[in-house]
Amino acid sequence: MSWDIKQQVNFYLEEFQPPKIPQDLRLILIGVGVHVAVAVVVVVGLAINWTWQGHRLESVTARHNLVEQQVANIERERPPLQLDQTLVDERARLREDLESSQRILRYLTQQELQSSHSFTSMVAQLGEQNISGVWLKNFSFLEEGKDISLQGYTDDPAKISRYVTSLLARDGYRDHAFRSVDVQRGEDGRWLEFRLDSRPQKKEKPAETQRTALTSREVMRQLREGR
C-alpha cells in the first residue's frame, strides 16, 4: 500500500480564469462602437450625396449655359422688336373713342334709369284709353316728359276731341296741353291720320340754314372737348 498524497486542482474556478471586462463597461463599449459605426455610415452617405449633388449641379449649370447660348444666338439672328408708331397712335385713338363711347353709354343709361319710373304711369294711362274709332300708332315723351307727341288713326275727327279730353283728365296728363293738332287724309282715303303735339308748331323759314348730321366720331370729339 502506498501512502502518497494526491492533489486535485479545479481549473474552472474564477481564480484560474482569464480576466474579464465588467458587464457595465462592456455595455458602454458596445454602445460606443454602435454609435461610431452609425457615424461612419452617415459620413460615408453624406460624402456620396455631396459628390452626386456636385455632379448634378454641374449638369444643370451646363444645360442652363446651353439654353442661354441658344437664346443669345436667336436674339442675334432676329432683329429687335420695334413697335409701329402708326399702330400705337391708332390704338390710342381707338381707346379714347372707346372711353368716350362708354361715357356716353353710361350717361344715356343713367338718364333712361332716372326717367323710366316717371314714364311708367303715363304709358300705363295711355294704354287705358279706350275710344272706339281711335287707334294710336306711336307716341313720344320729350324733355323728360314735359312734351308729348302722339300719332294715330281715326275714322271721325270728332273722336279726336273726346280722346284728348279723356286723356288730359288722367293724373299723368293734367299738367299738359296739346298746342298742335294735325289731321290729314290717309293715302288709301279710308282713315284720317292725326298728330297731337304739346309743343307749338314751328314755322319754317325759307332762308334758314339746315344743320348737317354729325358722325359718331365727331360727336365723341366734341364731347371730349367739352362742347
Image (cartoon, rainbow, N blue to C red):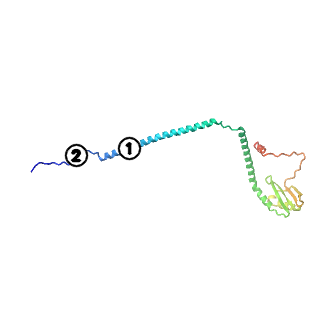
Quarter of the rendering containing residue 172: bottom right
**Residue denoted by label 2:** 16
- Farthest residue toward the top? 76
Mark 2 → mark 1, Cα distance in angstroms = 35 Å
Circles 2 and 1, Cβ within 8 Å, touching? The answer is no
Type of the residue with mark 1:
Ala
Residue 21 placement (x, y as % from top left): 29, 45
Tag 2 secondary structure: helix
Residue 72 placement (x, y as % from top left): 60, 36
Relative to 170, 84 lies left or right: left
- Farthest residue toward the bottom? 132
Q: Dot 1 surroundings within 10 Å: few (below 14), some, or many (20 or more)? A: few
Q: Nearer the viewer, residue 155 or 28?
A: 28
Residue 80 placement (x, y as % from top left): 65, 36
Quarter of the rendering containing residue 100: top right
**Residue denoted by label 1:** 37
Mark 2 and mark 1 lie on one chain; the one further toward the N terminus is 2
Q: Residue at x 71, y 40 (%)?
A: 87
- Farthest residue toward the left? 1
| Residue 201 position (above or below residue 32) | below
Quarter of the rendering containing residue 167: bottom right
Type of the residue with mark 2:
Phe
Q: Nearer the viewer, residue 213 or 43?
A: 43
Q: Residue at x 73, y 43 (%)?
A: 94
